[in-house]
Image (tube, grey):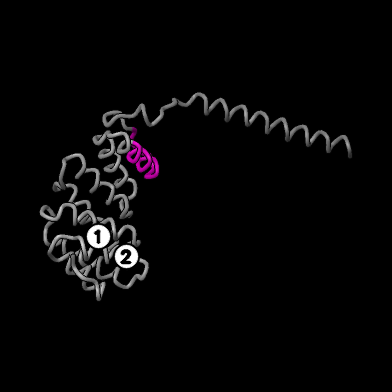
């Protein structure tokens, strides 16, 4: 019995060793490509949304707006039901063009279509985007943004940000909505 147990254990450890050597060989033989090597024209296709999200965030951090934009486009294809992916595309398109264009505004509309109400931090992002590009945002998006502020009125943790918006947003529908959710706060 001792001899067969030793044989089984030896066989198992040998197989594990061979398997780890094979896995190591496979990993070493894969072409190594860091995010720094990737450009908008050499961006690999058919990766997961997490890959494109990470790549886009790194590209934006180093100022490669074309790569950040392309990564965001591919992220929305990989994760079409993720509102945050559409937010990143809206942001990347607006950053690359200096203002929201048709693609950026379409991406934000798609984010609302996918998830009308999202986490409070994502709602804050939507309001900040609309406030930043107030003149370029169509009325349909402004109405959706006002609905975000109204929904945030039911979230106690968002009191301070709504109070800040009430005091600082330019006059208009967004400021009115923020002030409506923060009673007793004086505008400017």
Above/below status of 151 relative to 101 = below
Give the overall secondary structure of the magenta segment: helix
| Residue 55 is covered by the magenta coloring | yes
Q: In the rendered view of the protein, which quadrant contains the C terminus?
A: bottom left
**Is 73 placed left or right of 54 in the picture?**
left
Mark number displayed over residue 160: 2
Is 75 drawn above or below residue 176 in the view shown? above
Estimate the spatial distance between the alpha carbons at disc 1 and disc 2, rounded to whole Å.
Answer: 24 Å
- Mark with earlier residue (1, 2): 1
The residue at the point 25 percent across, 46 percent down is: 89
User: Residue 165: image x %, image y %?
Assistant: 23, 62
Q: Position of residue 43 (x, y in %)?
A: 31, 32
Assess disc 2: are there few (<14), some (14-19) or many (≥20) residues with their C-alpha within 10 Å of its C-alpha. Answer: few
Taking the spot 63% from the left edge, 31% from the top edge, the residue there is: 19
In this rendering, is residue 110 above or below 33? below
- In the visual, does 158 lie left or right of 101? right
Q: Tell me where the magenta segment starts and ends, as one range.
A: 44-58
**Identity of the residue furthest to the bottom in this view:** 183
Report the front residue among 60 and 38: 60
Q: Residue at x 56, y 25 (%)?
A: 25
Q: Say which residue label 1 marks.
A: 112
Q: Which quarter of the picture shows residue 121?
A: bottom left
């Amino acid at each position: 019995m001792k001899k067969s147990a030793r044989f089984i254990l030896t066989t198992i450890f040998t197989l594990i060793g061979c398997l780890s050597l094979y896995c190591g060989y496979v990993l070493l033989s894969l072409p190594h490509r860091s995010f720094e090597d990737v450009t908008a024209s050499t961006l690999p296709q058919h990766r997961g949304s997490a890959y494109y999200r990470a790549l886009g965030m790194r590209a934006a951090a180093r100022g490669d707006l074309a790569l950040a934009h392309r990564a965001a486009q591919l992220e929305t294809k990989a994760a079409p039901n993720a509102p945050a992916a559409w937010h990143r595309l809206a942001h990347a398109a607006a950053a690359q063009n200096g203002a929201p264009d048709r693609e950026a505004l379409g991406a934000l509309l798609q984010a609302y279509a996918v998830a009308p109400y999202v986490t409070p931090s994502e709602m804050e992002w939507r309001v900040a985007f609309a406030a930043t590009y107030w003149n370029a945002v169509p009325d349909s998006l402004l109405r959706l943004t006002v609905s975000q502020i109204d929904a945030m009125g039911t979230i106690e943790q968002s009191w301070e940000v709504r109070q800040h918006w009430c005091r600082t947003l330019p006059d208009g529908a967004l400021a009115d909505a923020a002030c409506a959710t923060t009673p007793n706060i004086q505008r400017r």
